[in-house]
Image: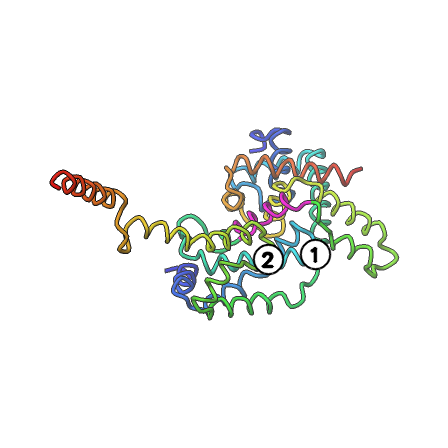
Amino acid sequence: MTDDEALMQAIVAGDSRAYEAAIRQHLKSISHFAFRMLGNSKDTEDIAQETFLRLWTHASTWQREKASVSTWLHRIAHNLCIDYLRKDKSSLSNEYEDEHEGSDRPADAPEKSQQLAALQQALDALPERQRSAIVLSHYHGFSNKEIASIMDISVDALESILARARRSLKAQLKQ
Amino acid sequence: MSMNMTPERFAQLVDIHGSQPARWPAQERQAAEAWQRDNPAAAALCREYAQLEALLDALPVPPLPGLEQRVLQRAASLATDSLLDQAMDWLLPRGDRLLAWIWRPALVACLPLICGIYMANFFSFGISGPEVAWEEELALLALNDYAEITE
């Protein structure tokens, strides 16, 4: 039996310590993913809470042969973020931008600061699925097969999305 | 190996997988690395993507203070919730799920009505149906007529 299986069996059986262990193991990755998708800590917390609530209530639906627990949780978080962005896009606020404006960066790095702000804007401007694909690929190191599973699309479709996202970010930075 | 690679395929590989050869598909990696070494344009494309990746790495997620504690607190309350608490959580969900706030209480409010209709269909509660009453009425009228005739 794999670690994932043992963990999920314990959660299904109502073992609260196993549930807490799963939260400690996956919270950082899930919250970072949500923050990079939504750009603010309040919505990030809502997504993290809801993702781990579903881990508790829907653990019995996890299927070992389909995905690892990490992939499964990121799939839940991805769907929640996409739903959130589609429903409530107008209320998006970006703490990255606040952070860039308020940071005490050394005076000799204004160019890099500008580049980072431009990159953040370019990321925000990406369609949700392109942003999700880039975040999962670059920051989380998932394979293309895993990302395709998280986003519920074919690997070919994912590669097309990734290529468009990278080209778009590169073009924005060149401007 | 380099012969199998084309400028278009190399650009496509880097667009999809980025500038790090370790992320390129194993079966094409050798040919792509040779192509990159032999072609200045390919090397320049990789440098552009490497710059982009370095900038992406420089965009950290700020600290999210207290998040782990709050998620664990919620987890602890979930794991120890009684059935009544769970029912109340379902009835009045936390957060801003407006639709769930409306339809769930409405459904619960309708339950007694639905139960009442269902039970009334099955039980008469001692009240006889109108067809029985009419039969009795007709029998009494017939008896009355008979009594008048015989007088």
Out of B68 and A166, give the one closest to the viewer.
B68
Label 1 Cα neighbours within 10 Å, binned few <14 / some 14-19 / many ≥20:
few
Residue lying at 51% horizontally and 55% vertically, measured from the top left: B105
Callout 2 amino acid: Gly
Where is residue B110 drawn, in percent x and y?
45, 52
Residue lying at 14% horizontally and 40% vertically, measured from the top left: B146
What label does residue B60 carry, if any? Answer: 1
Where is residue B23 drawn, in percent x and y?
58, 45
Residue A76 lies within the magenta run: yes
Q: Mark 2 lies on which chain?
A: B
Q: Magenta stretch mostly in which secondary structure?
A: helix
What label does residue A65 carry, if any? Answer: none
- Residue range highlighted in magenta: A74-89
Q: Quarter of the image holding residue B94?
A: bottom right
Alpha-carbon span between mark 1 and mark 2:
28 Å
Which is more N-terminal, label 2 or label 1? 1
Residue lying at 54% horizontally and 56% vertically, measured from the top left: A51
Q: Mark 1 lies on which chain?
A: B
Q: In this view, does A97 lie to the left or right of A63?
A: right
Residue A132 lies within the magenta run: no
Residue lying at 19% horizontally and 44% vertically, measured from the top left: B140
Residue that numbered label 2 is attached to: B95
Q: Quarter of the image holding residue B43?
A: top right
